[in-house]
Image: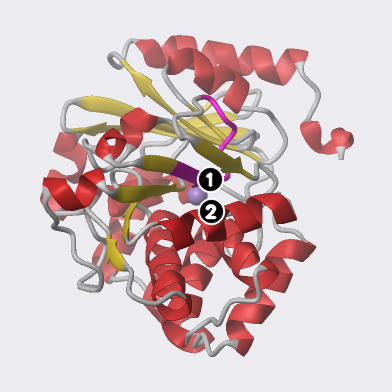
Amino acid sequence: MISKKDAKLISKKISEYDNIVIVKHQLPDWDAQGSAMGLAHLIQENWKNKNIFIPGARLNDDQNFSQNFDQNTLSKALIITVDTGNSSRLDFDQWNQGAEVLKIDHHIPVENYGNYNIVDVEAVAAAQVIGMWAIMMKLKISKEAAENIYTGISTDSGRFLFDRTSPETMEVAKTLLMAGADLNKINKFLYVGSLKQRQWTNYAFGKMQLTKSGIAHIILEEKDYKKFALSYDEVKSALSTMAGLNEIKIWFTVIEWEGIYKVSLRSRDYDVNSVAINYNGGGHKLASGAKLKDLNEVKKLVANLEKLLKTKKGIENEK
Ligand SMILES: [Mn+2]
C-alpha cells in the first residue's frame, strides 16, 4: 500500500496546479486507460477549476478530458503518469515539458523519471493505487470514476485471479462497487468477445510450441493476424490461451508489431522479470514485457527461461 505521506503528496501536488496532464503508456491497456480516466474523474469531482487533459491513444470512444492543449498550458502543468515504468513507453513525447512530473505506478522501478515517484509494486493494478489513494484521502467517488478504476483492476488482476490480488484489491473493489460501479455492464463489456476473436485465439493456440520442461511460446507475425483485422490488444489475447495449464510453467508471445518484436512473458511461479530485463524489458515478477531484435533471438530466450526453471525455485515459497 502507498504510505499516507505519499497519498497526501499526490493531493498536495494536484492542489498546487490548475493544469493537469495525465499520461499513460503507449498501446494502452485497460489498466492504463482506467487509471488515467479514473484519476481524471476523481480530480474533477474533488477539486474545483482544474483543467485536465489526457493525451494519446484511447481504447474506446470515451471523449472525456481533451487530448489537445497548447505549449503554454503544458509548461504550467503538473504531469501525472500512470501505469508506466519507463519514460520511453509514455504515450506523450513532451512528458518532460511540464512544470513537474508525478509518477504513479505498480511496475518494478527501473527508471525514476518523475520529480516524485510513487510506486507500489505490491498492487496488482495501477488502478488499485489510484483507488487506494481515493480511499485514504476520503475522496468522493462518482460512478464514472469507479467504473474506470474497476475496469483497470479487473483486467490487470485477470479477474482477481493473478498473484498479487490481495485484501487491498478486494477493499478497493468493494469501495468501487459501493460507489455505483455496474459490475454486470463492465463484465459484459470486457469479457464478451466476438466469434472472430475466438477464431483468432484458436488459430494462435495452434501455433504454440512447448518444450519438455514446460516453456511455451507463440510467434505471431503480421502475416498471421493481417487477415483477422485486429488491434494490438486483440492480437495479444493469444497470450492467455497458454495460461492456467499444468504442463506450461512459463509462457510468452512474440508479436511483430510495426516492425518491432514485442514479447509478453508470464508465469505462475517463476521470476520472468529477471530474464526480461536482459531483453530491453521488465515489468513484474510474474508478468513482464521485452523486445527482440529479430526472431533468431527466440531460441536464446527459450534457453534463458529453461535455465530459470532449472536454477531458480518457484517464488511461491517466498510468500
Ligand atoms: Mn498495469
Image coordinates of residue 117 in percent, x first then y, are: 55, 38
Q: Which picture quadrant has residue 17?
A: bottom left
Q: Which residues are magenta?
A: 102-110
Please state which of residues 135 and 97 is positioned toward the viewer in this rendering.
97
Instruction: Tell me how far mark 1 sits from mark 2, CA to CA.
Output: 5 Å
Mark 2: few, some, or many residues within 10 Å (few <14, many ≥20)? many
Image coordinates of residue 16 in percent, x first then y, are: 44, 57
Tell me whether circle 1 and circle 2 mark residues in contact (CB < 8 Å): yes
Amino acid residing under circle 1: Asp
What residue appears at the point 27 percent right and 66 percent down from the top-left corner? 51
Amino acid residing under circle 2: Ala
What residue appears at the point 25 percent right and 73 percent down from the top-left corner? 64
Q: In which quadrant of the rendered image does the C terminus lie?
A: top right
Q: Which residue is mark 2?
A: 126
Mark 2, ligand 1, within 8 Å: the answer is yes
Q: Which residue is mark 1?
A: 105
Image coordinates of residue 68 in percent, x first then y, are: 13, 57
Mark 1: few, some, or many residues within 10 Å (few <14, many ≥20)? many
